[in-house]
Amino acid sequence: MPAAPPVAELVARARRGESSAFDQLVRRHLRAAFAVALAVLGRPADAEDVAQEAFVAALERLDDCREPARFSGWLLQIVRNRALHALAKRKLRDPSDHVIELGREPVVGDVVLRAHLLVALAKLSPVQREVVLLHDLDGWTHAEIAEALELSEVNCRQHLFTARRALRAELAHEEVHHGTGT
């Protein structure tokens, strides 16, 4: 199987109108875009919508990407801005809206764990959420995250360490107080 083309090459091809090149960019960055949107919004459905909107905007503004090799960071900035805008709109519509809601009906097993994880993620700073989701959900390296978020690798590692520690503490607290174990 041939090596995947570099991002800069895909951007150049997409600028020339090759839809398959943009499709490859989407496939490479979809999970990361979702992770960043989820880090801001806290709701998977909203994050999916924002990620899709961001890809449409990126395609429309592809010529604005001054450094094609840094497409990832440019795209994730579009995702982050759109997610922040969506969050602001949501808060305007309903200031009492809570990002994470468990609902009235009892939930069990993985659904409870997922709900607790979303609550724990919501308590992290936005940059910590982005780093932990990009690293642990999408498998990005520290170097890739650092470049995309314009952080140093050391700073990226520190955010990941702090985020994981906070998540462990919060999930342990949930386990003790809500008894989600079997």
Image: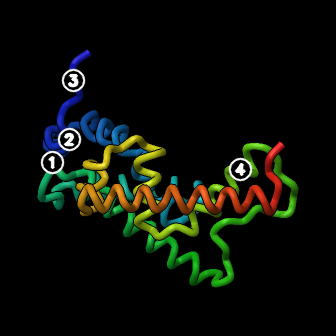
Give me the C-alpha separation between circle 2 and circle 1.
Answer: 6 Å
Label located before the other in sequence (4 or 2): 2
Residue type at mark 3 is Ala
Assign a secondary structure to mark 3.
Answer: loop
Q: Which residue is mark 4?
A: 113
Query: Label 1's element?
Result: helix
Q: Residues within 10 Å of mark 1 (few under 14, many from 20)?
A: some
The answer to the question of whether label 3 and label 4 lie on touching residues, with beta carbons closer than 8 A, is no
Question: According to the image, label 3 marks what residue?
Answer: 3
Q: Position of residue 158 (x, y in %)?
A: 37, 60
Q: CA distance from mark 1 to mark 4?
A: 38 Å
Q: Three-letter amino acid code at disc 1?
A: Ala
Cα distance, mark 4 to mark 2? 36 Å
Camera-nearest label, 3 or 4: 4
Q: Does residue 112 sit above or below 127 in this rendering? A: above
Q: Earlier in the sequence, mark 1 or mark 3?
A: 3
Residue assigned mark 1: 69
Is the residue under label 1 in contact with that under label 2 (CB below 8 Å)? yes
